[in-house]
Amino acid sequence: MPDRLINETDTVLLIPAHEMLGIPNAVTPTGLTPFDALTAAILNRYAPVVTTSHANAGAGGNVSCAIVSDGFTLNLTDSEEDDERTLCDPGNSVDLTDFNFDADMTGFRDETPGNADSVFELWRRLTFAPDVPYLLVHRVGYASTVPFAVGQEISIYYAFTDLPVDVHADGAKQKIQQVFVPKSEAEINYTLAA
């Protein structure tokens, strides 16, 4: 039987973002860092933030343990294409114009609203309003408690929150679904160099 990755090897960070001159940047205590120049130190600022009571809580954090495994989609889809050609372009050439991706996550809601020691409350607070810009960082192959390090591979997606959707059914756990609005910027399989 072939080896396969299990759910415990996914990490999802929501890092606050700010766009400057068309480039999404991570918001850090020392300023802005372009999304395609993230470092392990920046990621490790947000990775231990798993509750709203953490010293660095407020704008981002590690929501891995709040996300329902079968309610998680974060991957590229078909890109937009421009098929306008010059007289010198090959007959079937196209230019890719925008990265498209799906970013749909459902996380549990805490039974005690406002519980400062709950990753579920962190999820709710980070996704409770629309139009909040984030860099969605996804790492596969390491538990969410393992610090980020040079040589690890991550994927980064730039997206805004949308209106959260309450998900509840009779006898089921209550959840919050967030279908992020993709902003056509992604860095896939980015290797941390610093």
Image (cartoon, rainbow, N blue to C red):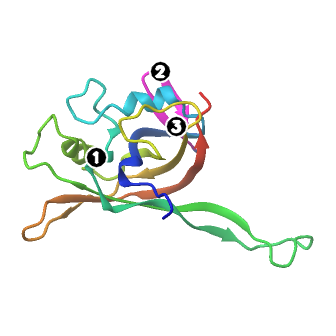
Callout 1, which amino acid?
A: Cys
The Cα atoms of the two marked residues, 2 and 3, are separated by: 12 Å
Cβ atoms at labels 1 and 2 below 8 Å apart: no
In the picture, residue 11 is in which quadrant?
A: top left
* Residue 28: mark: none
Q: Which residue is mark 1?
A: 65
Q: Quadrant of the C terminus?
A: top right
Residue 25 among magenta residues: yes
Cβ atoms at labels 1 and 3 below 8 Å apart: no
Q: Is residue 110 left or right of residue 91?
A: left
Residue extending farthest bottom:
91
Callout 3, which amino acid?
A: Asn
Q: Would you place residue 86 above or below residue 115 in this image?
A: below
Residue extending farthest right:
88
Dot 1 alpha-carbon crowd within 10 angstroms: few under 14, some 14 to 19, many 20 or more: many
- Classified by dominant secondary structure, the portion drawn in magenta counts as strand
Q: Secondary structure at mark 2?
A: loop
Callout 2, which amino acid?
A: Thr
Position of residue 151 measured from the top left corner of the image (x, y, whole percent):
59, 35
**Sequence order check: which comes first, mark 1 or mark 3?**
3
Q: Is residue 103 left or right of residue 183?
A: left
The Cα atoms of the two marked residues, 1 and 2, are separated by: 28 Å
**Sequence order check: which comes first, mark 2 or mark 3?**
3
**Sequence order check: which comes first, mark 1 or mark 2?**
2
Q: Which residues are magenta?
A: 23-34
Q: Which residue is mark 2?
A: 30
Dot 2 alpha-carbon crowd within 10 angstroms: few under 14, some 14 to 19, many 20 or more: few
Q: Would you place residue 108 above or below residue 168 in this image?
A: above
Q: Which residue is mark 3?
A: 25
Cβ atoms at labels 2 and 3 below 8 Å apart: no
Position of residue 76 measured from the top left corner of the image (x, y, whole percent):
54, 62
